[in-house]
């Protein structure tokens, strides 16, 4: 209502609220409603950025990123990729002008671009985008570990998966080990937040070790992932029961015996 009466004053607030609403709805699994809110935020930010690029291009890039995630969640992978590509292009220009302010956003967009490219089978391009995200986040984490180590660990996990898909198994193992080490450190400091990420990284580590024929250490990593998921599923079965079941299935396949 306020934005209808006074667009210049209240459209930026409306766009920001819609962007946040879209993210919350996506987190609750309400993907169609999330997509509608995020699309409206992006449309508003595009109008605002046309009028005042310096002020609103960063917000447009953020909403394009969220739009890409929303489109991907409903299976519209080509449209998701187009949105994230535009976000990368915007963030790259912004980061060139002001690296300290916008390199974190560029790394986030590149990480999302890697996910989008992988979803449409462009594995080499996904690897290149994720490598660039890792490189940026590694520098950022050196300067400010508390702020950027979680993002670096996430990009390293993705990097390990893309390297594995391309048959670069030794490099995949190195990236995945580093992700595990970071997630273990983070989970020691804040278990409630980072234990799920540690469990996921251990799962990936088990896969990488198994690919290289290192069966015993692969089993150890997968068993640790199972124990973490067992604890998490006991606390929140709706979220983690499927992860526990999947990891138990992989562990059973590796060990050659049924597990429960």
Image (cartoon, helix red, strand yellow):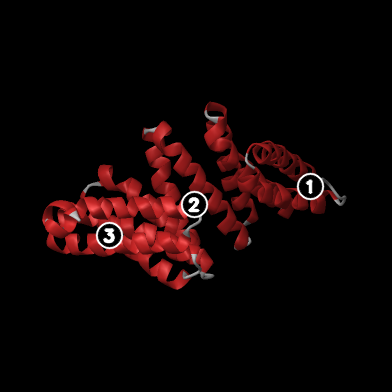
- Discs 2, 1 touching: Cβ within 8 Å: no
- Residue 3 in percent (x, y) is at 18, 56
- Quadrant location, the N terminus: bottom left
**Residue 140 picture quarter:** top left
Whether residue 173 sits left or right of residue 6 in the image: it is right
Residue 227's place in the image compared with 200, above or below, is above
Q: Residue at x 61, y 47 (%)?
A: 239
Q: Earlier in the sequence, mark 2 or mark 3?
A: 2
Q: Residue at x 39, y 47 (%)?
A: 136
Q: Earlier in the sequence, mark 2 or mark 1?
A: 2
Q: Residue at x 29, y 59 (%)?
A: 41
Kindly report the distance in space between the C-alpha atoms of the residues bearing marks 2 and 3.
29 Å
- Quadrant location, the C terminus: top right
Which residue is denoted by mark 2 in the rendering?
28
Which residue is denoted by mark 1 in the rendering?
215
Residue 248's place in the image compared with 42, above or below, is above
**Looking at the image, which is closer to me, 143 or 44?**
44
SS at mark 2 in the image: loop
For the question of whether residue 231 can be seen, the reply is yes
Residue 49's place in the image compared with 227, above or below, is below
Q: Residues within 10 Å of mark 2 (few under 14, many from 20)?
A: few
Kindly report the distance in space between the C-alpha atoms of the residues bearing marks 2 and 1.
38 Å
Res. 90 mark: 3
Q: Earlier in the sequence, mark 1 or mark 3?
A: 3
- Residue 227 in percent (x, y) is at 72, 37
Residue 81's place in the image compared with 138, above or below, is below
For the question of whether residue 128 can be seen, the reply is no
Q: Nearer the viewer's eye, disc 2 or disc 3?
A: 2
Q: Nearer the viewer's eye, disc 1 or disc 3?
A: 3
**Looking at the image, which is closer to me, 33 or 254?**
33
């Amino acid at each position: 209502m306020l934005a209808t009466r006074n667009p210049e004053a209240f459209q930026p607030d409306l766009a920001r609220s819609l962007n946040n609403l879209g993210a919350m709805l996506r987190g609750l699994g309400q993907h169609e409603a999330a997509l509608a809110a995020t699309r409206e935020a992006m449309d508003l930010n595009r109008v605002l950025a046309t009028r005042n690029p310096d002020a609103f291009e960063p917000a447009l890039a953020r909403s394009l990123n969220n739009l890409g995630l929303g489109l991907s969640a409903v299976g519209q992978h080509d449209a998701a990729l187009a949105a994230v590509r535009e976000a990368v292009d915007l963030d790259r220009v912004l980061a060139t002008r002001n690296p300290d302010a916008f390199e974190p956003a560029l790394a986030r967009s590149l990480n999302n671009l890697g996910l989008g490219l992988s979803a449409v089978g462009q594995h080499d391009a996904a690897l290149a985008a994720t490598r660039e995200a890792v490189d940026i986040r590694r520098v950022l984490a050196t300067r400010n570990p508390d702020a950027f180590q979680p993002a670096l660990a996430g990009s390293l996990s993705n990097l390990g998966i893309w390297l594995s898909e391309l048959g670069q198994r030794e490099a995949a193992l190195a990236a995945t080990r580093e992700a595990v080490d970071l997630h273990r450190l983070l989970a020691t400091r804040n278990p409630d937040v980072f234990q799920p990420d540690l469990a996921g990284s251990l799962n990936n580590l088990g896969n990488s070790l198994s690919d290289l024929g290192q069966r015993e250490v692969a089993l150890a990593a997968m068993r640790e992932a199972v124990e973490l998921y067992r604890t998490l599923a006991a606390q929140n079965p709706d979220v983690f029961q499927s992860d526990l079941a999947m990891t138990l299935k992989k562990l059973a396949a590796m060990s050659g015996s049924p597990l429960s």
